[in-house]
Amino acid sequence: MSTISLSSGVRAALGSLSSVQSSAGQAQYRLSTGKKVNSAVDDPVNFFTAAGLNDRASQLTKNLDGISNGIQTITAASQGIDAINKLVSSLQSTIKQAQADAAANRPTQTGATSSTTATVSGKIGGGAVGTKSAKDVALDTKLGGTEALATASADGALGLAANVALTISAGNTTFTSTSLTGTSTVRDLVNEINKSGIATATIDDGGHLAVTGSGSDTLKVGLASSAVDSATAVAASLTATNDNAKIGLTAAFATTGVTATTNSAVRSNLVNQFNDLTKQIDQLAKDSGFNGKNLLTGDKLSIVFNEKTGSNQSKLDVQGSTVTSANLGILQAGSSDTTTSFDIQNDTSLSNAADTLTNVLTTLRSTSSSLGASLSTVQTRQDFTKNLSNTLTAGADNLVTADTNQEAANLLALQTRQQLSQTALSLSNQADQAILRLF
């Protein structure tokens, strides 16, 4: 215990000065840290609440890195799809080039030999007569009537029966006509063949009938007649007993048909171009990854949005798919139709390839749309997470951050009180010093 006795005035002045100094020190500390709550002692509720808010904000901020990587992964895959779209468009252009060069590989048969009276060496009607050219003689020759060559006074006749049937087939397409009769002419026959859309017929200057396929498939043409009905004639045209010889064509033209004897050099040159483009599709898909994840090779991307675990965790799973030319259904170009290639020389195969590429573009657009929807979702969650993290941090700061203006004013007031307390202490001491003057 102190043996020094102070007067009540001095002791009161000392107590006040000590209190003011303590308050001033606290104000200075708050100004230096910028916080009004620096420990649980200051305000346990606000301190731990702010700590929890800051901890959640920190965890959400860490998730932003994963969200950003997810956005880049989806973007890389989307850009890959866009580039593959362009390659598929190039494939379509290649197919169109091949389709444009078709004349070289059309199956054709031209009347050349005949054992019938009305056709001499494939010439229908026997050739030029009087002022009529061999072509006009052939076109005016009747299908029916008594078989005979044309004369200066009469048209030729092929000697077919009253009911005449025509069948034309190529690939899976068949055209059948029973509108011709014995009174029809070769001109009518030519028009009927041209109407089929499967083949075209012409009579050359020598009077020979030539039939050419509209496509590159094996072409079959059969002509037959019957005195009974057209149905019988149709059946007969598919057998070796057909009447093709009457128009200078072979009987086998109706059964085994004819195929093209040459191939398109342009189409042959496009094989490598087409196949190289399909390889580029495969390679481009493999290069569309980011940070070890590639949605175009079947990888699965999981993007976590919140700080929770288990069933309370918020995330988005983006399942990729393996994008290759084979998976898209694009076959390699070749010289025959197989499960992995198509015949570039065949019009039907080219048409099927063109349809496939159209479907591929639809598939790619669907994939691109799906990636776009996922990207939009992730970007929305990224913005939300940033804003939420800022909100949590601001909320925590509101609980513990000091009002510097107020603390500065408090410190100024406390410094003034400190000076006043020191003055009061001095005055109290002066009262005690008066006693010294008695000695």
Image (spheres, rainbow, N blue to C red):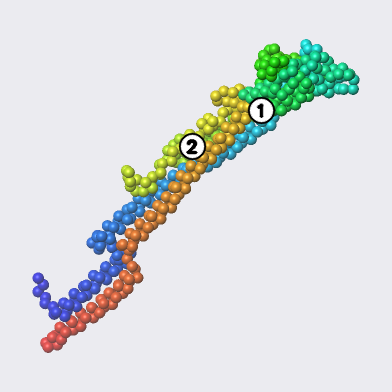
Which mark identifies residue 213? none
Q: Nearer the viewer, residue 19 or 66?
A: 66
Q: Residue furthest toward the front?
A: 228
**Can you give x and y, in whole percent of width and height, for residue 269 in the image?**
66, 28
Which mark identifies residue 296? 2
Q: Residues within 10 Å of mark 1 (few under 14, many from 20)?
A: many
Which of the 4 quarters of the picture holds residue 226?
top right
Which mark identifies residue 267? 1
Q: Is residue 324 left or right of residue 300?
A: right
**Can you give x and y, in whole percent of width and height, for residue 210 in the image?**
76, 21
Q: Residue at x 61, y 22 (%)?
A: 336
Q: Nearer the viewer, residue 351 or 277?
A: 351
User: Which amino acid is tagged 2?
Assistant: Leu
Quarter of the image with the N terminus in it: bottom left
Q: Residue at x 66, y 30 (%)?
A: 98
Q: CA distance from mark 2 to mark 1?
A: 31 Å
